[in-house]
């Protein structure tokens, strides 16, 4: 068993593109609404929840803070939908994903650090870690799929030990 140490890279639209969408207003187009009192930023993520009689489900998750280096023991994916997370407390959080492919999954893991002003929308079937809040317990707005079929697969990462750090 070998240690794989990943330094979380800044979360950017370009770097995260193979896994889904970065949800942020920075650099995005907008328009004035409500008699010029609000800016509206549209279409920030490709929400995909309708497969198999699915419907949108909006939730708030409260994630306990984790320390770094953070050990990655398992990943999950959602075969019937995308899954979106947006931080409500403007705190940084870790985003851990894996590329598709035939090589061992540990060799395909990537880590990103959200600024706290960015969320993510994981594409359908993208392997990812559950929420990893940093600093303190944090709230996240989550857009997910509700429906009659099970929509979560999990895989344990045996073998190589993956540690994620922010520094």
Image: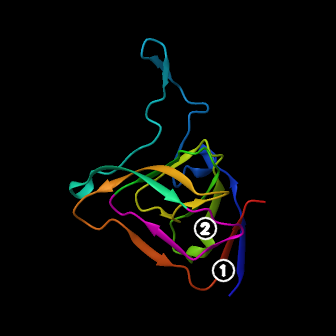
Determine which of the numbered discs, if any, sits on residue 109 in the image. 2
**Does residue 67 belong to the magenta stretch?**
yes
Looking at this view, name the residue that lies furthest to the right: 167
Q: Residues within 10 Å of mark 1 (few under 14, many from 20)?
A: some
Determine which of the numbered discs, if any, sits on residue 88 in the image. none
- Circle 2 or circle 1, nearest the eye: 1
Q: 150 or 133: which is nearer to us?
A: 133
Task: Please state the horizontal and vertical placement of residue 59, each as a whole percent of the image.
Answer: 39, 51
Q: Which residues are magenta?
A: 64-80
Vertical side of 15 occupied by 35: above or below: above
Q: Residues within 10 Å of mark 2 (few under 14, many from 20)?
A: many
Helix, strand or loop for disc 1: strand
Q: Residue at x 29, y 68 (%)?
A: 150
Looking at this view, name the residue that lies furthest to the front: 137
Q: Is residue 123 left or right of residue 162?
A: left
Q: Residue at x 69, y 72 (%)?
A: 163
Determine which of the numbered discs, if any, sits on residue 161 in the image. 1
Q: 23 or 87: which is nearer to us?
A: 87
Quadrant for the N terminus, please: bottom right
Task: Please state the horizontal and vertical placement of residue 17, each as a whole percent of the image.
Answer: 55, 49
Vertical side of 103 occupied by 41: above or below: above
Vertical side of 7 occupied by 27: above or below: above
Task: Please state the horizontal and vertical placement of residue 155, each as a whole percent of the image.
Answer: 47, 77
> How far is mark 2 from mark 1, CA to CA?
11 Å
**Does residue 130 belong to the magenta stretch?**
no
Helix, strand or loop for disc 2: strand
Vertical side of 29 occupied by 126: above or below: below
């Amino acid at each position: 068993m070998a240690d794989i140490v990943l330094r979380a890279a800044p979360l950017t639209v370009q770097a995260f593109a193979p896994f889904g969408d970065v949800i942020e207003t920075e650099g995005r187009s907008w328009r004035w609404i409500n008699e010029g009192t609000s800016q509206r930023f549209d279409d920030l993520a490709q929400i995909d929840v309708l497969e198999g009689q699915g419907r949108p489900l909006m939730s708030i998750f409260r994630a306990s803070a984790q320390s770094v280096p953070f050990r990655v023991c398992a990943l999950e994916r959602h075969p019937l939908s995308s899954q979106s997370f947006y931080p409500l407390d403007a705190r940084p959080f870790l985003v851990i994903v894996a590329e598709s492919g035939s090589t061992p999954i540990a060799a395909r893991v990537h880590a990103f650090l959200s600024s706290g002003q960015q969320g993510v929308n994981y594409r359908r079937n993208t392997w990812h870690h559950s929420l990893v809040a940093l600093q303190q317990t944090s709230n996240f707005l989550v857009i997910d799929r509700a429906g009659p079929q099970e929509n979560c697969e999990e895989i344990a990462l045996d073998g190589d030990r993956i540690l994620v750090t922010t520094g």
